[in-house]
């Protein structure tokens, strides 16, 4: 009897451990999804800065090309200046050069502004690339940790289940049936301790006589309130 009770207590502890570990294991894919989601957001953010930087470079290149064409236009106009026949034509070409030069000067200002913007953004981009590198490595580490955790939980479950299997072989069939039935009805908890006349399953008081019997190990007794199998545990010595 005493032995059977100790088997039941051990079985209950294992079953509780199994449900605890199973629950933790189920949380892992959720954690992983969150990890992936956060990382994707980070990736999208840095990608956006990279694209902005590339766009600035393209815009600068386009302005420089325009400036080059403007300078070529001036060279051509100056060549034409040597070929004109009349003063009127000469004045017209000079006017044309003046207009192109004014336009070129505007473009030059735009190129300078673009270069400044590029320098500014490069500082930000470099900083964010460095940060992103660190976060990438952290992401890989977190991913590995989650995978290791899943594997270790899996191994723990297998070992608990093996022990449950061995333990059940030693428990009387009827008693095991009683245990399983109470466990099903009572939210996974079928065997509980009593201390100072209080059932640790339902936290109700049990009659003093029953408490005496439990202490004296008079058979496999049940809590009259929740019907769980009860045993006495001196909680002055046990954590
Ligand atoms: Zn109870």
Image (cartoon, rainbow, N blue to C red):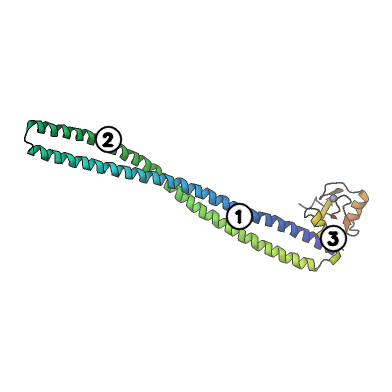
Q: Earlier in the sequence, mark 1 or mark 3?
A: 1
For the residue carrying disc 1, how many other residues have a C-alpha within 10 Å: few (<14), some (14-19), or many (20+)? few
Q: Position of residue 106 (x, y in %)?
A: 25, 34
Q: Nearer the viewer, residue 43 or 162?
A: 43
Q: Nearer the viewer, residue 33 or 70?
A: 70
In which quadrant is the N terminus drawn?
bottom right
What residue does disc 1 label?
29
Q: Position of residue 154 (x, y in %)?
A: 65, 62
Q: Earlier in the sequence, mark 3 or mark 2?
A: 2
Q: Position of residue 120 (x, y in %)?
A: 36, 39
Q: Position of residue 226 (x, y in %)?
A: 85, 51
Of tags 3 and 2, which is closer to the observer? Answer: 2
For the residue carrying disc 3, how many other residues have a C-alpha within 10 Å: few (<14), some (14-19), or many (20+)? some
Distance from disc 2 to disc 1, alpha carbons, whole Å, reads 55 Å
Examine the image and state in which quarter residue 21 appears. bottom right
What residue does disc 3 label?
178
65 relative position to 184: left or right: left
For the residue carrying disc 2, how many other residues have a C-alpha within 10 Å: few (<14), some (14-19), or many (20+)? few
Tag 2 secondary structure? helix
What residue does disc 2 label?
109
In the rendered view, would you say 138 is above or below 84?
A: below
Residue at 34% from the left image edge and 41% from the top image edge = 118
Tag 1 secondary structure? helix
Residue at 85% from the left image edge and 60% from the top image edge = 178
């Amino acid at each position: 009897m005493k032995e059977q009770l100790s088997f039941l207590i051990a079985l209950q502890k294992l079953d509780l451990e199994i449900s605890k570990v199973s629950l933790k294991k189920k949380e892992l894919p959720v954690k992983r999804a969150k990890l992936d989601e956060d990382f994707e957001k980070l990736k999208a953010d840095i990608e956006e800065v990279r694209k902005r930087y590339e766009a600035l470079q393209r815009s600068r290149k386009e302005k420089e090309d325009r400036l080059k064409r403007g300078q070529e236009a001036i060279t051509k106009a100056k060549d034409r200046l040597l070929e004109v026949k009349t003063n009127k034509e000469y004045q017209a070409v000079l006017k044309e050069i003046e207009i192109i030069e004014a336009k070129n000067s505007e473009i030059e200002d735009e190129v300078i502004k673009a270069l400044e913007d590029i320098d500014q953004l490069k500082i930000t981009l470099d900083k964010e690339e460095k940060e992103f590198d660190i976060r990438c490595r952290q992401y890989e580490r977190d991913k590995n940790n989650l995978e290791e955790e899943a594997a270790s939980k899996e191994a723990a479950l297998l070992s608990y289940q093996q022990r449950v299997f061995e333990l059940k072989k030693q428990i009387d069939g009827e008693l095991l049936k009683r245990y399983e039935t109470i466990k099903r009805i009572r939210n996974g908890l079928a065997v509980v301790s009593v201390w100072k006349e209080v059932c640790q399953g339902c936290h109700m008081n049990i009659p003093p006589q029953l408490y005496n019997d439990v202490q004296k190990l008079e058979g496999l007794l049940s809590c009259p309130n929740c019907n769980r199998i009860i045993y006495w545990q001196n909680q002055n010595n046990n954590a």
